[in-house]
Amino acid sequence: MNRQELVNLIKEKQSYLCVGLDTDIQKIPKHLLSHADPVFAFNKAIIDATKDFCVAYKINTAFYESMGIRGWESLQRTIDYIPSGIFTIADAKRGDIGNTSTQYAKTFFDTYKFDSVTVAPYMGKDSVTPFLQFSEKWAILLGLTSNEGSQDFQMQQIGEEFLFEKVLKAGKEWGTPDNLMFVVGATQSSQLAYIRKLVPDHFFLVPGVGAQGGSLEEISTQAMNKDCGLLVNASRAIIYAGNGEDFAADARRVAQQYQQEMAGYLRRIVVETV
């Protein structure tokens, strides 16, 4: 999916919601465990319930890899089931020497047909650029994450800058707003407006809303740009909104609430930019 298609999708659905399919077989409703593929049965119901309100699905590959070949089969069925025209993210956090990164990129772009993959930038430019060589595919570079450990390295000052600032400034030179996004954690709200000034045109993937306590209002008012420029991810808050036989209806209700709130922020930005 190219940038204009993503922007058009956001405008059409009045949403920048990304639903995280971080599906833990230990947490799904018990009645699904009798299915041949319980994880896919759960994902299928969540997708059916939320596809009207989101523009993206993010699959955290760790929850699938941990189950071996059965997990990869569940992932394949899930990615095949997501409707065409919805943006897909492989949350795999890959990044290695160039020839290895090339194979990772082929895995997620050619074999599994994702639109994007999250990439760890610690090894530098040559570990990232292989992900940027695919037409209408995206690398989503870890910028400033929402976990407690972000303080260990990302918030360390190097000269006059924090490390995360160096990553953002370098990253935007490696790619373009058409093939590179940044992960910016929702719980880093004090930094959002500043980060948007550093990278005004790139999309942000923003995790940490819902279960992690990030504020959708703060994210939207501080980090939205003229094209929206945001994919805000909610995982547990949506997919585990209920755990009974009507779990999908509960997920739909929460996803719709996010979409309606997002529509309000999108209308506000349109008014402010006219």
Image (cartoon, rainbow, N blue to C red):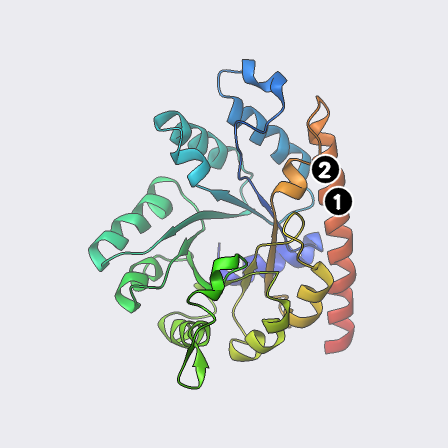
Residue at 26% x, 65% y: name it: 126
Instruction: For the residues labelled 1 and 2, say whether their Cβ atoms are less than 8 Å apart.
Output: yes
User: In terms of secondary structure, where does tag 2 sit?
Assistant: helix
**Viewer-closest of 242 and 150:** 150
User: In terms of secondary structure, where does tag 1 sit?
Assistant: helix
Q: Position of residue 37 (x, y in %)?
A: 49, 21
Residue at 44% x, 86% y: name it: 160
Q: Position of residue 4 (x, y in %)?
A: 55, 62
Which residue type carries mark 1? Answer: Gln
Q: Is residue 174 left or right of residue 214?
A: left
Seen as rendered, the residue at the extreme left is 99
Which residue type carries mark 2? Answer: Arg
Image quadrant for the C terminus?
bottom right
Q: Is residue 130 visible?
A: yes
Provide the residue designation for mark 1: 256
**Viewer-closest of 39 and 107:** 39
Question: Which quadrant would residue 235 be assigned to in this image?
Answer: top right
Q: Is residue 64 left or right of residue 221?
A: left
Using a 10 Å C-alpha cutoff, classify the residue at mark 1 as few (fewer than 14 neighbours), some (14 to 19) or many (20 or more).
many
Q: Is residue 274 visible?
A: no
Q: Position of residue 266 (x, y in %)?
A: 73, 64
Q: CA distance from mark 1 to mark 2?
A: 6 Å
Disc ID at residue 252: 2
The correct choice, above or below, for 17 with respect to 73 in the image is below
Residue at 70% x, 66% y: name it: 218
